Every structure is written in structure tokens, then in C-alpha cells.
């Protein structure tokens, strides 16, 4: 992993969460949701997740990005995909022998 990858993954994860939160706020105000936010969020995290699946599946970066994608899939009512991703995330967590505050 390149030195700047860590920052890139963190920024993309946070940006995705911002898109998710904006979508949530729009829904809360009973405004018709602007799917563009979630689509943009998915475009940000999906390529990174695919990249990390081949290189660093057990990294915290992968876990954060995967959690962001799970939220997106749930909002899109894609529960089967969300369930599959949750199982993938649980498989990673079940391997942990020591947790920290970020887990």
C-alpha cells in the first residue's frame, strides 16, 4: 500500500458518509430524496472496495468503506446485497483477536 493510500481511503469513506447524511436529512424533511447523492457515494466507494478486496481485505480502510456501502444498499432497499456485505464484514470481525476503538 502506498503512503498516501491511507489518507485517500479515509477521505473517501468520510465523503461517502457525508453523502449518506445529506440524503438522510433530505428524507427527514420529507423531500423527495435526491438519489444522486447516494449514487455519487457508491461511485466513490465501490472501486476502492474492489481494489482492497484483492489487496487488503482485512484492513480498517476496507471495513470503513464496506460499512459505507452497506448503508447505501440499505437505503436503496437492496437488502440481499446489504446482507451479503454484512456477512463479509462479520467474517472479518470474527477473525479479530484484539479490538480497538476504531473497530
Image (cartoon, rainbow, N blue to C red):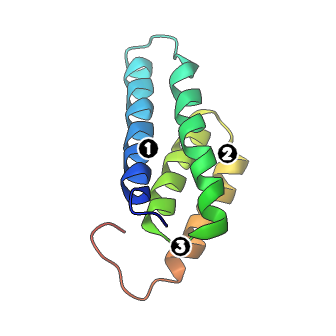
In the image, residue 72 above or below residue 99: above
- In the image, residue 80 lies at what x, y percent? 72, 49
Q: CA distance from mark 3 to mark 1?
A: 17 Å
In the image, residue 44 above or below residue 64: above
Mark with earlier residue (3, 2): 3
- Label at residue 79: 2
Residue at the far left: name it. 101
Question: Mark 3 falls on what kind of element?
Answer: loop
Q: In percent of the image, x 45 and y 10: which residue is there?
A: 31
State left or right for residue 41 relative to residue 25: right
State left or right for residue 16 relative to residue 90: left
Q: Which residue is mark 3?
A: 58
State left or right for residue 43 relative to residue 22: right
Q: CA distance from mark 3 to mark 2?
A: 23 Å
- In the image, residue 60 lies at what x, y percent? 43, 66
In the picture, the quarter occupied by the C terminus is: bottom left
Mark with earlier residue (2, 1): 1
Quadrant of the rendered structure where residue 46 is?
Answer: top right
Q: Which residue is mark 1?
A: 12
Residue 87 visible within the image:
no
Quadrant of the rendered structure where residue 88 is?
Answer: bottom right
Question: Mark 1 falls on what kind of element?
Answer: helix
Q: In percent of the image, x 64 and y 64: which residue is there?
A: 53
Counting other residues with Cα less than 10 Å from the Cα at mark 2, is it few (<14), some (14-19), or many (20 or more)?
few
Mark with earlier residue (3, 1): 1
In the image, residue 34 above or below residue 100: above
Quadrant of the rendered structure where residue 38 is?
Answer: top right
Q: CA distance from mark 2 to mark 1?
A: 23 Å
Amino acid at each position: 500500500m502506498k503512503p498516501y493510500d491511507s489518507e485517500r481511503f479515509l477521505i473517501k469513506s468520510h465523503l461517502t458518509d457525508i453523502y449518506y447524511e445529506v440524503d438522510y436529512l433530505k428524507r427527514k424533511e420529507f423531500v423527495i430524496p435526491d438519489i444522486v447523492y447516494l449514487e455519487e457515494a457508491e461511485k466513490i466507494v465501490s472501486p476502492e472496495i474492489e481494489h482492497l478486496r484483492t489487496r487488503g481485505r482485512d484492513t480498517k480502510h476496507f471495513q470503513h468503506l464496506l460499512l459505507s456501502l452497506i448503508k447505501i444498499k440499505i437505503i436503496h432497499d437492496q437488502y440481499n446485497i446489504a446482507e451479503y456485505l454484512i456477512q463479509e464484514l462479520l467474517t472479518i470481525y470474527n477473525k479479530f483477536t484484539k479490538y480497538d476503538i476504531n473497530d
